[in-house]
Amino acid sequence: MKLREAISSFLLIPIGKTLSGRHYFKAKAYQRLLEGMERRPIDEIEAFQNIRLKQMIEYAYENTPYYRELFDREGIVPSDIKGRDDLKGVPFLTKDILNRNLDRLISRNVKPKDLRKVSTGGTTGTPITFFRDHRSEWMVDGSNWRFWRYCKYELGHTLAKLWGNENDLLQSVNLYGKLKAVMDNETALNFYDLSEERLKGYVAFIKKKRPRIWKGFSSAVYTFMRDTKRHNEEIPLPEAVIITSDRIEEAQRKELNEFFNNRVFDEYGCREFSILGFECEAHKGIHVGMENAIIEIVPGNNESGYGEVVVTSLINWGMPFIRYRLGDSSIFAEGDCPCGRKLPRLKSIGGRIADFVVTKSRKLIYGDFFAHLLYGTKGIEHYRVIQEEAGRVIVLLEKNEFYSEEETKRVLSQFEEMVKDDLEIEILFVDKIEMHASGKRRSVISKISKEYLP
């Protein structure tokens, strides 16, 4: 470990975390607990999870007005919920319900000074505000640190952060953000407001600083990789690349792996729960941290096998989240992972639940359909599919210098061959496809698909 990394790892981070109240040494102890537990038989891990679930259900009923009223109205007896299968009778918590019942979801047993307010723009179009219990944040840290070690990333390692969330980037330039960056030994690279000049500057930074780890929005890492290839830039490759937040298509992921010599790791998380899962060195799916949360996959009305991700937090005592509809879709992987860890795995994150397209016959088509159509088109820089009415979509295309009309004709021909008359398409060329305010690049935005989901 380099001297600068050692300073962050053994001095700055322990001091900074302790002063901020996040209990560094408790977090490290919890990290070690999780690392030992994740290789134990699955029934032992489930027993640990069930104990926490029973505690959370009873706590939510006793301390939050919303859940007491909900359980009483639905005839739910807290003591009857002993495991994840017993949760199926509890109605979902949605972003809309959360916004309307914010005060009633906050625990009466937690002092206001022990709560941290968090806001997010919401890529599904529903901004939310929620609270996190300060007392549980060291558990979040310990879990995150456990996951990062899957790709050999240790606290203090030199990290380049290829980020796309405007609010995060703004916070990174204030005094607190600058101090935190020094503490963590990381540098934020702005991919929200991107220009050719900035990309050149980032190449120069990578060549000079040679960061050990890259972490960033999946689309940001892909954009940077594609730009360096286009300009035939020779850059020092990191030991690992962590992609997170937004989603790229499978073909793009394959291209990333080829460029980075199979050192790309998926991180799955959100503002509400931090990191929910992480890809291990076997690259056979995303292990989920079942010690901190219960993840359910609720079957959907589609042929892909993917269902909606529903999450129950087991550690946020300040504001319990029980069966929260996250807005993502996924599917569990079968069998054991070659790495030896017994934590269940998500096969992949299939995209936003809203990213299904509805045909004239009310059939749901998963958004990857368009990715496969457009894969291999050198002249299309970005695309976005927008649906406002069943049976019709608008496809926005952002061209680059390699564009040819032949590509568009080929895509339209394949489209017509595959969907027949069940879906109409209108193509519009635009100068630039803007990112969502959250910094995530959504390739498919359906404003109606929720009406056709169960």
Image (tube, grey):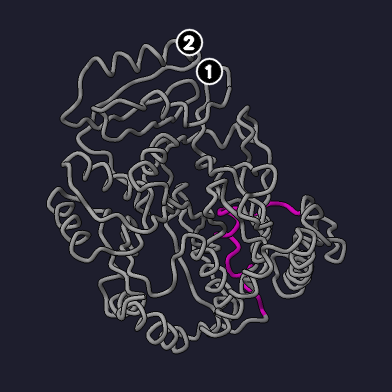
Q: In this view of the protein, can residue 104 be seen by the observer?
A: no
Check disc 2: other Cα within 10 Å, few if <14, some if 14-19, many if 20+.
few
The image shows residue 163, relative to residue 174, as above or below, that is above
Span colored in magenta: 90-108
Q: Give the residue at mark 2.
A: 421
The image shows residue 368, relative to residue 417, as above or below, that is below
Look at the image and say whether residue 101 sits in the magenta stretch. Answer: yes
Q: Residue furthest left?
A: 197
Left or right of 197 in this view: 443: right
Q: Are marks 2 and 1 in contact (CB under 8 Å)?
A: yes
Q: Which of the 4 image quarters holds residue 25?
A: bottom right
Look at the image and say whether residue 336 sits in the magenta stretch. Answer: no
Q: Amino acid at mark 2?
A: Asp
Q: Give the residue at mark 1.
A: 360
Check disc 1: other Cα within 10 Å, few if <14, some if 14-19, many if 20+.
some
Q: Amino acid at mark 1?
A: Lys
Q: Nearer the viewer, residue 158 or 447?
A: 158
Q: In what quadrant of the picture does the C terminus appear?
A: top right
Mark found first going from the N terminus, 2 or 1: 1
Please give the name of the residue rendered at 53% of the width and 26% of the height, measured from the top-left corner: 365
Left or right of 112 in this view: 383: left
How many numbered marks, from 0 up? 2
Q: In what quadrant of the picture does the N terminus appear?
A: bottom left
Q: Please, what secondary structure does the residue beneath circle 2 have?
A: loop
